[in-house]
Image: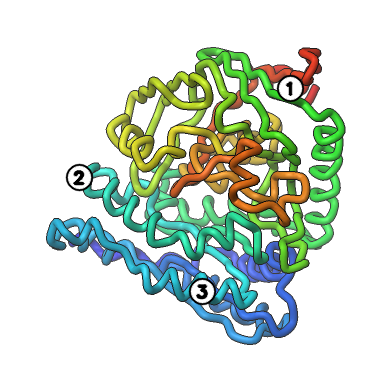
Amino acid sequence: MTSPMLDLSSAIDPVKLDKLAETAIKVGLRLAPGQDLLITAPSAALPLVRRLAEHAYKAGAGLVIPFFTDEEMTLARYKFAPDSSFDRAAGWLYEGMGKAFSANTARLAVVGDDPMLLSTQDPAKVSRANKANSMAYQPALEKIAGFDINWNIIAWPGSAWAKQVFPNDAPEQAVRKLADAIFAASRVDRDDPVGAWEQHNAQLHTKTAWLNSQRFAALHFTGPGTDLTVGLADGHEWHGGASTAKNGITCNPNIPTEEVFTTPHAHRVDGYVSSTKPLSYNGTLIDNISVRFEAGKIVEAKASRGEDVLQKVLETDEGASRLGEVALVPHSSPISKSGLLFLNTLFDENAACHIALGQCYAKCFLDGATLTPEQIAAQGGNKSLIHIDWMIGSDQVDIDGIGADGTRVPVFRKGEWA
């Protein structure tokens, strides 16, 4: 076994940690009185989960139910479990979660595990375990991807993660730095985080309103290693910041967030594109991704690191090699300006424009809440067991919006809104 994880929670500002928990409940979820809450988190994040429970109950929560993961137990599986273990997942657990979400239970995920946890493990086993888990997770994921309920993701500055982001610092200093970066990106390092989020949401809604008024048929990305035309789904709708779930609650699913996003057409993506930041995926790092699309499908894929994992991801199912999301983020976003590579998609995707392989979001369609899965597919929405964001934006990337009549409108120039 590896050495025990260090408990460095004393390095984290308790006042700001409490503000993060309060913001997650009041802004991220806007938890309704009487609503139950299901929380998943790394075991090291217990101090944050306790604060989340406190603020949830103050907001009138019915029940707060936590589920914890543990890095040592995850590694024990890869070291000692029989081969057949990697084709199994706790389907009964996800079926229970699906039932909970059907009963209007809110969902909150805390991330913070070591992004390189599985980097030295057998890629085939990692791929098999991920696929089995993705398949078992469907009853719960359908409620989240369909935006049936209010949900939210926040981060805990885990010690192993902090060491990856700040490798030259002592463990305690690394955790302190990562915690401060999380607090700043999450807008809880100020006197009135709730007010700051109201202002930020208004700015994002201004961008989505403009994009929705344009009714672009496609976006054209150009830059180093990139010449990509992303057709947009029929009846697509742009979103960003706070959105209203099918249960009527307006929430901020991601804290932090700097993106506006919509659904590409699964069969109308052509050209080539290169990643501008590494992708940390389930404990492995995939760097310098370069892919080529034809009629919406990736037909060539390369990476300087983690290519074997990338290839396994693309083989997950038919939709894994097609796009489910395209998102716009200015290069001047606060997370980009921090200069940090977080090695965590929740943060790194908010530093650059990005695309996502796999499942689309039903809410990114006009009247999406009323559309059937068949209608979404007919309008170009993609279906898959996965949803993996990776970054393609930088200060060297331009984006044009292309109208149905072929007219072009500048959207981004050198990574900034045009």
Indicate which label's residue lies in the foreground, 3 or 1. Answer: 1
Q: Residue at x 42, y 41 (%)?
A: 280
In the rendered image, residue 368, in percent from the top left (x then y), is placed at 72, 50
323, above or below 156, in the image: above
| Nearer to us in this view, 188 or 403 | 403
Say what amino acid the circle numbered 1 marks. Answer: Phe
Q: Residue at x 38, y 61 (%)?
A: 136
Residue linked to disc 3: 47
Mark 1 is surrounded, within 10 Å at the Cα level, by few (under 14), some (14 to 19) or many (20 or more) other residues, namely: many
Quickly name the residue at label 1: 412
The residue located at (65%, 59%) in the rendering is 147
Q: Answer with mark 1 or mark 2, whichever residue precedes in sequence.
A: 2
The image's mark for residue 231 is none
Please tell me whether residue 265 is drawn above or below residue 300 in the rendered image.
below
Mark 2 burial class by Cα count in 10 Å: few <14, some 14-19, many 20+: few
Ranked by sequence position, the earlier of labels 3 and 1 is: 3
Contact between marks 2 and 3 (CB within 8 A): the answer is no
* Helix, strand or loop for disc 2: loop
**At which x and y percent is residue 411?**
77, 23
Of the pair 17 and 406, the residue shown nearer to us: 406
**How far is mark 3 from mark 1, CA to CA?**
41 Å
Nearest the viewer among 19 and 118 is: 118
Amino acid at pointer 2: Asp
Residue under label 2, please give it. Answer: 122
**Residue in view at x 64 percent, y 25 percent:** 231
Badge 3: how crowded within 10 Å, few (<14), some, or many (20+)? Answer: some
The answer to whether the residues at label 3 and label 1 have Cβ atoms under 8 Å apart is no
Residue 21 percent coordinates (x, y):
64, 69
* Quadrant of the image containing the N terminus: bottom left
* Disc 1/disc 2 C-alpha distance (Å): 41 Å
